[in-house]
Image: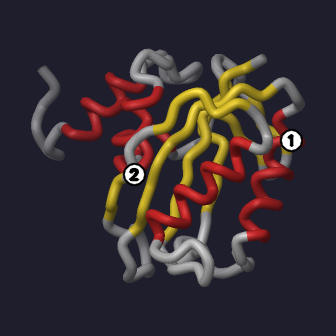
């Protein structure tokens, strides 16, 4: 079984699950129905990127999955729809967003599925929870651990590297 890293995010309330943090907790329970959720980060409150105006609740889960990654992506998109996710503008407000971040050392580009996630290394809202779940995971293309990627993201912009 491969360990898959999945990002969870929400910035809209849900009729049954409440505020975004409640949506993320409920989505974690739905993920547990797909496979063994081995580790879960704390839920982080983060600022939106792009035109969205609401703050996000973000987390990362490490889960065991023994099927093909395209099947997992299909299952994640089904969970999003079950939570009321509708197609909309990029970076817009959403009740739930689930993304496959990584699958060990796998590098895959197959239609909408790109692993590791192409912007993983640039996003604090992913890196902050990721280091709680898999600090030693190594990005297969960049060769850096999650801890190293996080440290780079924390470095103030414009300062030279040591």
Indicate the position of residue 62 as horizontal and vertical percent values.
58, 31
Residue 43 is labelled as 2
Please give the name of the residue rendered at 71% of the width and 52% of the height, measured from the top-left corner: 30
35 w.r.t. 20: above or below: above
Tell me which colouring the rendered structure shows.
secondary structure
* Percent coordinates x, y for residue 129 in the rendering: 39, 41
Query: In front of the other: label 2 or label 1?
Result: 2
Q: Give x and y (percent) for residue 126.
A: 44, 46
Residue 92 in view here: no
What is the crowding at mark 2: few (fewer than 14 residues within 10 Å), some, or many (at least 20)? Answer: many
Q: Tell me the SS state at disc 1.
A: helix
Q: Quadrant of residue 52?
A: bottom left
Q: Quarter of the image containing the C terminus?
A: top left
| Disc 1: which residue | 70
Between discs 2 and 1, the one toward the N terminus: 2
> What distance separates the C-alpha of mark 2 from that of mark 1?
26 Å
């Amino acid at each position: 079984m491969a360990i898959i890293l999945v990002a969870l995010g929400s910035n809209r309330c849900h009729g049954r699950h409440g505020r975004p943090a409640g949506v993320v907790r409920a989505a974690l329970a739905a993920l547990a129905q797909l496979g063994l959720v081995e580790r879960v980060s704390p839920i982080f409150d983060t600022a939106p990127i792009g035109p969205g105006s609401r703050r996000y609740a973000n987390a990362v889960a490490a889960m065991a999955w023994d099927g093909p990654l395209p099947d997992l992506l299909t299952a994640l998109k089904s969970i999003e729809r079950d939570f009321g996710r509708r197609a909309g503008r990029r970076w817009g407000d959403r009740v739930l967003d689930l993304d496959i971040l990584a699958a060990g050392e796998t590098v895959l580009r197959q239609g909408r599925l790109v692993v590791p996630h192409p912007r993983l290394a640039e996003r604090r809202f992913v890196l902050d929870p990721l280091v709680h779940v898999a600090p030693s995971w190594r990005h297969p293309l960049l060769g850096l651990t999650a801890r190293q990627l996080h440290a780079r993201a924390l470095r103030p912009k414009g300062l030279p590297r040591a």
